Amino acid sequence: MDPIRNPYAPGAGQRPPELAGRDEQLSAFDVVLERIARGRPERSLVLTGLRGVGKTVLLNALRSAAVRRHWGTGKLEARPDQGLRRPLSSALHQAVRELGHPQADDVDHVLGVIRAFAQRDAGPNAKLREQWNPGIDAPVVKGRADSGDIEIDLVELFTDIGGLAADVGKGVAIFIDEMQDLGPDDVSALCAACHEISQSGLPVIVVGAGLPHLPAVLSASKSYSERLFRYQRIDRLAREAADRALSAPADDEDACFTDEALAAMYAATGGYPYFIQAYGKAVWDLAPSSPITEEDVSVASPEAESELAVGFFGSRFERATPGEREYLHAMADAAAAIVERSAAAAASSSGEPVETLDEIGSVPTADVASVLGKKPQSLSPARDSLLKKGLIYSGERGRIAFTVPHFGRYLRDHA
């Protein structure tokens, strides 16, 4: 197969040639945009899921939908070592520019408020070189969004932005990737601002994306966050959608897969979008001709697994300290032990209840401690550090799971 015509795109956040299996989310967002445009109340949106399920790709697709409706949009990626003011100011600056408001004075006023919001971190006596602004020429507006209380400031900022959008019959959508990495104060302020905006009916929404524990992060900040956001879990693709993600790009290049090859691809990838692109690229490059067969998938699988081991799994594993890696390996071993016990119980037909591995592959923290032969309390520092690094998450109290699909299998294969 001609590698130059290879259509598959296994890149971080890179849109695949066929965005399969996300029609429901895209259609629902179109309804949200239309309702807000008509002055109807709507909630902000939060997408959650494991690494590699396409949250960032979907976030970008939703932003494109807002742009097509001539909304003002801005996007930022939260980082644990950075506050919200600067990246949000840049995102809102872009959103204001996209609105195309005809009154220059009104626009300059809102830009001045954004600049005041951004520069508040520098302090009142900061030198000029220490004052940061998101490329805004408008003068700073004193006494608006610059109190130093992020919750008060964000409410005022969103109110002014929403008013500007309402003037021209449009809306503003702010897209936040890796939302779970926001600091506690920033999360609280964002929830409060969304709450205030929804009550006032202004056309501003936040669309966030993050790991599966993001709803718990929001709920811990504000109890009403469960009603404030519409939560959508982004999961692996069903078989039909996974087949379409492979077949549609191949059809565009006058190639195809046999039914047996598609079945083998789904078995290898588990339906995870990033894995589909990685395997698709490897199989295309190594297959001698079309149609791509089950044997071609078998031949190319080691190449795909090697690529994932370095670029997807290995890069994350390298971020962990030796103690944290030990904890990760113990999680993988604990999960394997649950599977073995479940299989043994099924074979014995004893009828006695036995624990099975749940759909997210979580394991009790007590089992991890047992594998390591240590007390659970002594492992808290390693566990907490892995949580902060986004390598694991806690779906419920006393249990822990990987944020990366198939990570346990990778660890066992590279023990």
Image: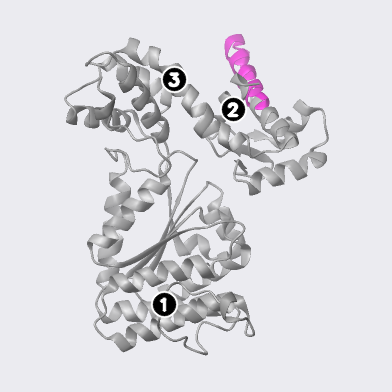
Query: Mark 2 or mark 1: which is in front?
Result: 1
Is 283 inside the magenta-drawn segment? no
Cα distance, mark 3 to mark 2? 19 Å
- Give residue 303's mark: 3
**Is residue 280 found left or right of 196 in the rendered image?**
left
Dots 2, 1 in contact, CB < 8 A: no
Q: Amino acid at mark 2?
A: Gly
Q: Nearer the viewer, residue 6 or 186?
A: 6
Q: Earlier in the sequence, mark 3 or mark 2?
A: 3
The picture places residue 290, in percent across and down from the top left corner, at 22, 16
Judged from the image, the secondary structure of the residue bearing numbered disc 1 is loop
Task: Give the residue drawn at x 62%, y 44%.
Answer: 396
Which callout, 2 or 1, points at the residue further toward the start of the chain? 1
Instruction: Depth check: give the residue in front, 117 or 267.
Output: 117
* Disc 3 + disc 1, Cβ < 8 Å: no
**N-terminal label among 3 and 1:** 1
| Residue type beneath disc 3 | Glu
The picture places residue 229, in percent across and down from the top left corner, at 45, 61
Question: Mark 2 falls on what kind of element?
Answer: helix
Note whether residue 72 is visible. yes
Q: Position of residue 23 (x, y in %)?
A: 28, 45
Count of marks, rendered view: 3
The residue beneath circle 2 is 408
Task: Say the numbered circle drawn on residue 305.
Answer: none
Which stretch appears magenta?
333-353
Query: With respect to residue 155, does 31 lie above or below?
Result: above
Dot 3: element: helix
